[in-house]
Amino acid sequence: MESAIILVFVMGYLAITLEHNLKLDKLIPALAMMAICWALVALGVDDFSNWFNSAKHALVENFPALGHEDKMHLMEETLLHHLGKTAEILVFLLGAMTIVEIIDYFDGFATIKSYVKTKSKKKILWLFSILAFILSAIIDNLTATIVLISILQKIVKRREDRIWFAGLIIIAANAGGAWSPIGDVTTTMLWIGKKVSTPMLFMYLFIPSVLCMVVPSFIATFLPAFKGEIETDDNAEDKKPGPHSATMLYLGLGAIVFVPFFKTFTHLPPYVGMMLSLAVVATFAEIYSRSKFSMTSIDSAESDAHSQHGPVHSSLSKIEMPSILFFLGILMAVAALESLGILFGFAQNLKETVPLIGTEQAGTGVSDLVVMLLGVGSAVIDNVPLVAASLGMFSEPIDDQLWHFIAFAAGTGGSMLIIGSAAGVVAMGMEKIDFFWYLKKISWLALIGFIVGCVAFMGMRTII
């Protein structure tokens, strides 16, 4: 039965990886994989020789000797445990996504565009790379990429120029998301899973992440694509930000940044703080929307629509629910493998067979090579299941250097292929970037940034 469960997982994983070839949304195989894996677990619960207690991170003693009812009860408890942990991540993401949509409802991101005054390609490259690095740490790398490419489309008219900027935005956004607990889904998973803390995450990963962004951007300034100035359309009229755009931008970003501080002070799960932040932002949104659309407005069609459906309702309707369902499916499917002790056994084999490189002084039994290969692997397949698997494989305590290295490798390794990260996939869709063009033009820059960042991390852990 274990072989059947592994086969279902591999087939589902393959379908997720080949999403674009199959023209099948990846949430479909993820949800099917989750349901079938747990169904097989329930049907074959009497035949398994091991059961993994996720709460204690150890195998259950004398599991085969338990009766059928006891095994079913243990399976239900385990399923509920994993659903609770997964729900923490999903509710957190729902809150963050809603806040970002509320900011966009008030054209808050148009405020950023008003700061772009230069026509120099080099200066625009640095401006967008730095913005991507900072914004991704606050509103996550996927959203930061969407926002910045949308702004880029209004500034850089030639698509041939834009795709180069988009490639560097992907690298910078993934680098920025790695050092922030709210900057990347995988880092958020490690943070909510109590594997990393905000202060230590910053101390370990900020400098490696900066180098991962700066080095590729610096090399890119010498490429022909970033020579000269951009072509502009002088006749185009820019949409001016609304009266509350800047206020909602700063309020929304501040509310998201508040969440780690809330967790530090209260020791409550991060989603609680995110719900409080959402409530505050939503309150101001409702107040401002009344002044934005007054009862005397002549624009009846738009005004009536917004008066019946306020900013919160409108923002919730725009949330990327397929991504939420995909995370649910993939995390719960990985949980099925973890519950049978498969991931635990795989981790033990890795520790024994892969040579230890540069880890003796760090005091861990996991090779740097394993973590770097995980980073490279995240470029080929989705990094969410890879990190989810690592949570079940390794039992190192909170803020062990292993977890920080995994956060960096999984977060930045995906930049090496355009399908390797959520930021890359969304940029690919927005600008119709060709897979092989990215592989030829951008991947080598991402690889250099990844290697420089890994080396910097190895140096940082000897200091901290």
Image (cartoon, helix red, strand yellow):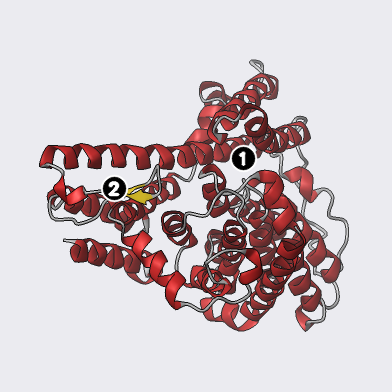
Mark 2 belongs to which amino acid? Val
Of discs 2 and 1, which sits in the foreground?
2
**Callouts 2 and 1 close, C-beta under 8 Å:** no
Query: In terms of depth relative to the viewer, which is nearer, 354 or 213?
Result: 354
Tell me how far mark 2 sits from mark 1, CA to CA: 43 Å
In the image: residue 248, left or right of residue 44: right
Where does residue 293 sit, x and y in percent of width and height?
65, 23
181, above or below 282, in the image: below
Where does residue 384 sit, x and y in percent of width and height?
47, 57
Q: Is residue 52 visible in the rendered structure shown here?
A: yes
Residue at figure coordinates x 29%, y 52% from the top left: 336
Where does residue 7 sit, x and y in percent of width and height?
24, 67
Residue at figure coordinates x 78%, y 43% from the top left: 111
Where does residue 46 sit, x and y in percent of width and height?
12, 50
Q: How many marks?
A: 2
Q: Is residue 156 visible in the rendered structure shown here?
A: no
Residue at figure coordinates x 60%, y 25% from the top left: 276
Query: In terms of depth relative to the viewer, which is nearer, 307 or 64?
Result: 64
Residue at figure coordinates x 55%, y 49% from the top left: 195
- Secondary structure, mark 1, is helix
Instruction: From the image, tell me which residue sits under label 2.
Output: 60
Mark 1 belongs to which amino acid? Val
253, above or below 31, in the image: above
Instruction: From the image, tell me which residue sits under label 1.
Output: 100
Query: In terms of depth relative to the viewer, which is nearer, 105 or 418?
Result: 418
Query: In terms of depth relative to the viewer, which is nearer, 266 or 312?
Result: 266
